[in-house]
């Protein structure tokens, strides 16, 4: 079976070409049906490929000199996009030369260029940034939006829930993902009007959308493992994500300090090393790397700028899975089912669903 190529912004990320190429090579070993379009400085890419003949044999290089820096504002990136590795990788998706793009570059620039180049899918007003977070359960939790949209209305939240559920079915294999809206409490009366309206819509439509919806969840429950998709606006989502990441680093640093405080602690560390290694693996962001811009006419995946080769490989693996499982088509199908449902739209929530005649 022939699958679309994955375009790699080889110049993105803190370490650029070396790590991006190493990561793509690792991913190629796991997904050997895929081919790659490596976008960036041809001389540097060819040099990096010398150590990865398997990737070299399955890749084409698209040369470009320009690079989007971490300091570039989205407006600056948009003006320069056509001559940059990030811009041309996304353009390759638009032109059909690749099925998806992966970049470790500037998040704001990537969002702006992706949205302008690919546009949003029919039925989606705004794309959302979604990522996988570790939990105490068997499956990771998908959280969106994580920063693409600082202000969202009920219509946006409903669309995010639809997209998140479709992604969850691909990522976790759960037939009916457990979807919740992030709120300050679980009672129906809690939260903003936008949250309450979105909850009312999703309760009425959930049975037509292959999801389980039971209202709200709170921030301390995100990683407990009893929810598959957490939906919120980009401002709240980004704050919550940074709090989760900061807490993980705090716990890891506290353990490290405690285990090095005395000879007895060091002996205790050696005894408990299997458990601490498991904790380290679970909290390592490289093992959950690859945030997805959902809702575009094409797949764009953001790798963390500081990701190592294994992290980049995970981002590419996420991309491959989304292509293999046709996540964009799944979202379109769910939107069509939403349009055919018979529930009534709550007062004040315009545009999501007209009352069926």
Image: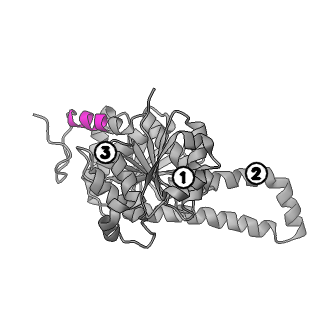
Relative to 327, is 172 on the left or the right? right
The span picked out in magenta is 332-340
> Is residue 162 found inside the magenta-colored segment of the image?
no
* Position of residue 147 measured from the top left corner of the image (x, y, whole percent): 39, 61
Looking at the image, is mark 1 or mark 2 nearer the viewer?
1
Looking at the image, is mark 3 or mark 1 nearer the viewer?
3
Q: Is residue 288 visible?
A: no
Q: How many marks?
A: 3
Seen as rendered, the residue at the extreme left is 357
The numbered dot on residue 275 is 2
The numbered dot on residue 289 is 1
Which residue shows up at 52% across the image and 33% down it? Answer: 33
Q: Find numbered disc 1 in the image and state the secondary structure of the residue it sits on.
A: loop
**Which label's residue is closer to the chain start, 2 or 3?**
3
Which residue shows up at 44% across the image and 69% down it? Answer: 69
Seen as rendered, the residue at the extreme top is 1
Q: CA distance from mark 1 to mark 2?
A: 22 Å
Q: Are marks 3 and 1 in contact (CB under 8 Å)?
A: no
Relative to 319, is 296 on the left or the right? left
Residue at which label 3 appears: 95
**Which label's residue is closer to the chain start, 3 or 1?**
3
Image quadrant holding the C terminus, namely top left
Viewer-proximal residue among 153 and 57: 57
* Position of residue 62 measured from the top left corner of the image (x, y, whole percent): 43, 51
Which residue shows up at 62% across the image and 43% down it? Answer: 53
How did the renderer colour the structure?
one colour
> Is residue 337 found inside the magenta-colored segment of the image?
yes
Crowd around label 3: few <14 · some 14–19 · many ≥20 (10 Å): few
* Position of residue 314 measured from the top left corner of the image (x, y, whole percent): 56, 47
* Position of residue 20 measured from the top left corner of the image (x, y, whole percent): 55, 54
């Amino acid at each position: 079976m022939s699958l679309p190529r994955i375009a790699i912004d080889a110049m993105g990320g803190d370490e650029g070409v070396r790590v991006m190429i190493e990561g793509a090579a690792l991913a190629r070993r796991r997904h050997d049906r895929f081919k790659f379009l490596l976008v960036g400085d041809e001389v540097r890419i060819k040099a990096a490929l010398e150590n990865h003949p398997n990737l070299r044999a399955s890749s084409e290089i698209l040369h470009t000199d320009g690079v989007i820096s971490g300091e570039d504002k989205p407006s600056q990136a948009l003006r320069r996009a056509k001559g940059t590795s990030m811009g041309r990788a996304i353009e390759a998706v638009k032109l059909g030369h690749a099925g998806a793009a992966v970049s470790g570059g500037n998040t704001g620039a990537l969002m702006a260029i992706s949205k302008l180049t690919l546009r949003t899918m029919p039925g989606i007003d705004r794309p959302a940034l979604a990522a996988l977070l570790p939990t105490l359960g068997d499956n990771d939790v998908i959280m969106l939006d994580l920063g693409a949209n600082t202000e969202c209305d009920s219509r946006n939240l409903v669309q995010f829930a639809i997209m998140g559920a479709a992604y969850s079915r691909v990522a976790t294999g759960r037939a009916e993902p457990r979807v919740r809206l992030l709120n300050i409490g679980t009672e129906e009366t809690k939260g903003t009007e936008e949250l309450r309206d979105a909850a009312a819509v999703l309760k009425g439509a959930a049975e037509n959308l292959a999801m389980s919806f039971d209202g709200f969840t709170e921030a301390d429950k995100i990683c407990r493992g009893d929810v598959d998709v957490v939906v919120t606006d980009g401002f709240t989502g980004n704050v919550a994500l940074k709090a989760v990441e900061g807490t993980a680093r705090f716990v890891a640093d506290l353990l490290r300090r405690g285990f090095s405080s005395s000879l007895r602690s060091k002996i205790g560390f050696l005894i408990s090393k299997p458990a601490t290694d498991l904790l380290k693996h679970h909290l390592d962001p490289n093992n959950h790397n690859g945030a997805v811009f959902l809702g575009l006419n094409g797949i764009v995946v953001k790798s963390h700028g500081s990701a190592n080769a294994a992290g980049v490989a995970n981002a590419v693996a996420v991309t491959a899975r989304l292509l293999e499982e046709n996540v964009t088509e799944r979202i379109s199908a769910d939107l069509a089912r939403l349009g055919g449902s018979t529930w009534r739209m709550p007062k004040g929530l315009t545009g999501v669903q007209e009352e069926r005649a």
